Image (cartoon, grey):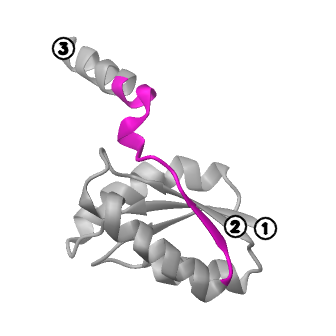
Amino acid sequence: MSDHRVLLLAHGSSDPKWCATFEKLAAPSLSSIPDAAIAYMELSQPSLDDEVRRAAADGVKSITVLPLFLAAGRHLRKDVPAMLERLSTEHGIAIELSAPVGEHPLLGDAIRHIVEESLTQ
């Protein structure tokens, strides 16, 4: 087991179909990155708190949180950093918040590919 863990963070929803969409989106990463996990900010399980607690119990020393958000709104500018600071202090784990996936230039290319594919159908 690694001393570093990647958590893919989604907002969360009370709708199980919404969560299933994010779990499907996360599946390729979860299957290729050892011990990676998906966590939800609110309304769904496993929560971010649960996954950080599990990482601490597993002896993990650092976590990278990759938000599955399109942009950094209020949650990513204020709420999530405050949650991560609290969790880092509570569990003695260094936690880094990455930029949301929506800011990565490859996502724009992926969207273009999907649009082009839909035009040929």
Residue 117 covered by magenta stretch: no
Secondary structure at badge 1 equals: loop
Q: CA distance from mark 1 to mark 3?
A: 45 Å
Of the 4 image quadrants, the one containing the N terminus is bottom right
| Dot in front, 1 or 2 | 2
- Outermost residue to the top: 120
Question: Which residue does the numbered mark 1 point to in the structure image?
Answer: 3
| Dot in front, 2 or 3 | 2
| Residue type at tag 3 | Leu
Given contact means CB atoms under 8 Å apart, are the residues at marks 1 and 2 in contact?
yes
Whole-percent x, y for residue 17 in the image: 24, 64
Determine crowd level at label 3: few under 14, some 14-19, many 20+ residues with C-alpha closer than 10 A. Answer: few
Closer-to-camera residue (66/75): 75
State left or right for residue 105 relative to residue 74: right
State left or right for residue 73 relative to residue 23: left
**Image point (43%, 67%), residue name:** 81
| Residue type at tag 2 | Ser
**Image point (67%, 64%), residue name:** 5
Mark 1 and mark 3 lie on one chain; the one further toward the N terminus is 1
| Residue type at tag 1 | Asp
Whole-percent x, y for residue 10 in the image: 37, 61
In this view, 53 is above or below 40: below
Determine crowd level at label 2: few under 14, some 14-19, many 20+ residues with C-alpha closer than 10 A. Answer: many
Closer-to-camera residue (120/85): 85
Question: Which residue does the numbered mark 3 point to in the structure image?
Answer: 119
Given contact means CB atoms under 8 Å apart, are the residues at marks 1 and 3 in contact?
no
Question: Which residue does the numbered mark 2 point to in the structure image?
Answer: 62
Quadrant housing residue 113: top left
| Dot in front, 1 or 3 | 1
In this view, 55 is above or below 98: below
- Magenta stretch, residue numbers: 92-108
